Image: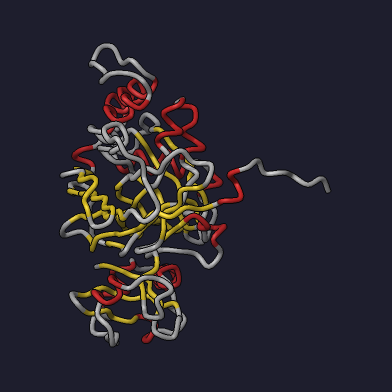
């Protein structure tokens, strides 16, 4: 089952089910359900899963527009369009975070970025390679055991979240943009403080790899960029085996094609349970009512192999057949005022 959030022809937020070409409008059935968040709260009150709550509503009200029309529409064009599939009415209650060096193909890109060669089994050369080796050794613990902590980073709150067809920003102070096609875990902390995984979505964990290349200790600020999630929330994916692909186009010409990118636990050195444990072990990450969107890493980046930089107008497409409709975003310049030092006023 795939959940979407969208805006209708009256510019009203709605939540629905993507069913083939149709969109089932859940808000038309229950007006108080104007978001995935509200549907989750109802499921919690009923002590059922989201899927169980929604199973009987598959024959609900059909929207007058198709999913394809929603998918093709851009925000601000005066027609219904898609929103990120999980949000909070207060953007400051959305945590956007990620886990890196998780995929068996990711270490080579990161090691090259940080000045090393691909690590050997016996002699990891960089801190990235050492961290990856630690994941191989202890990232998949037995059930009930705590494994090795993966790399973890913070991206921002709901203010940096973008949906399908929205712009990914290159701030004036940035050196470049960088695509990161990934799976995103979508969570809500229930009223008892228990993290609840709703499902997974496609994401582009947009970063500045050129800044990170200067020194790997710049990884933290290089992650403080906008990012995208969508266009739909897949409630059924088992996080085992998924093939993604990323395409970058400039003026309708393909600049970059990642080819097949494998994701899911079969291609990771850290298990899903281990990544989740090391994120939610912190009490501040278990505050009732908060939304968490967590990126699980990718196996390949374009940065180390390309001779071009991102420009406004470039289009990035992340796709995964049989999992979700593609997530498409364009690149835009932003934060022009930050090209010069920001002066702090004494109060």
Location of the N terminus by quadrant is bottom left
Specify whether residue 62 is in view: yes
Identity of the residue furthest to the top in this view: 123
Q: Locate residue 224 relative to residue 66 in the image: left or right.
A: right
Occupied quadrant, residue 145: top left
Number of marks: 0
Q: Residue at x 25, y 38 (%)?
A: 299
Specify whether residue 195 is in view: no
Q: Say if 175 sits above or below 181 in the image.
A: above
Q: Residue at x 31, y 58 (%)?
A: 199
x, y percent for residue 154: 49, 42
* Depth order, front residue of 228/31: 228
Which scheme is used to colour this image of the protein? secondary structure
* Depth order, front residue of 126/211: 211
Identity of the residue furthest to the front in this view: 251
x, y percent for residue 171: 50, 47
Q: Residue at x 26, y 18 (%)?
A: 119
x, y percent for residue 25: 33, 82
* Depth order, front residue of 208/294: 208
Q: Locate residue 47 relative to residue 254 in the image: left or right.
A: right
Q: Residue at x 49, y 54 (%)?
A: 160
Identity of the residue furthest to the right in this view: 347
x, y percent for residue 38: 45, 72
């Amino acid at each position: 089952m795939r959940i979407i959030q969208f805006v209708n022809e009256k510019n009203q937020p709605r939540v629905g089910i993507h069913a083939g070409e149709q969109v089932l409008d859940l808000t038309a059935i229950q007006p108080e359900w104007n978001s995935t968040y509200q549907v989750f709260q109802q499921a919690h009150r009923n002590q059922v899963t989201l899927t169980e709550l929604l199973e009987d509503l598959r024959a609900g009200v059909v929207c007058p527009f198709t999913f394809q029309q929603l998918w093709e529409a851009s925000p601000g064009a005066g027609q219904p369009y898609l929103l990120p599939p999980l949000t909070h009415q207060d953007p400051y209650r959305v945590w956007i975070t990620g886990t890196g060096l998780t995929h068996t193909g990711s270490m080579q890109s990161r090691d090259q970025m940080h000045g090393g060669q691909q690590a050997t089994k016996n002699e990891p050369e960089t801190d990235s390679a050492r961290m990856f080796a630690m994941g191989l050794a202890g990232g998949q613990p037995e059930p009930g055991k705590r494994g090795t902590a993966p790399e973890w980073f913070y991206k921002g709150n709901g203010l940096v979240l973008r949906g399908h067809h929205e712009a990914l920003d290159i701030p004036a102070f940035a050196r470049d943009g960088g695509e990161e096609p990934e799976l995103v875990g979508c969570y809500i902390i229930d009223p008892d403080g228990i993290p609840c995984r709703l499902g997974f979505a496609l994401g582009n964990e947009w970063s500045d790899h050129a800044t990170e290349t200067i020194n790997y200790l710049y990884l933290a600020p290089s992650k403080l960029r906008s990012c995208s999630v969508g266009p739909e929330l897949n409630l059924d994916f088992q996080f085992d085996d998924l093939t993604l692909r990323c395409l970058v186009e400039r003026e309708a010409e393909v600049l970059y094609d990642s080819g097949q990118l494998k994701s899911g636990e079969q291609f990771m050195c850290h298990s899903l349970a281990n990544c989740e444990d090391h994120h939610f072990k912190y009490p501040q990450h278990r505050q009732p009512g908060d939304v968490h969107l967590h990126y699980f890493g990718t196996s390949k980046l374009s940065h180390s192999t390309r001779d071009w930089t991102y420009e406004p107008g470039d289009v990035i497409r992340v796709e995964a057949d049989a999992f979700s409709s593609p997530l498409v975003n364009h690149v835009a310049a932003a934060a022009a005022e930050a090209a010069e030092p920001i002066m702090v006023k004494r109060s």
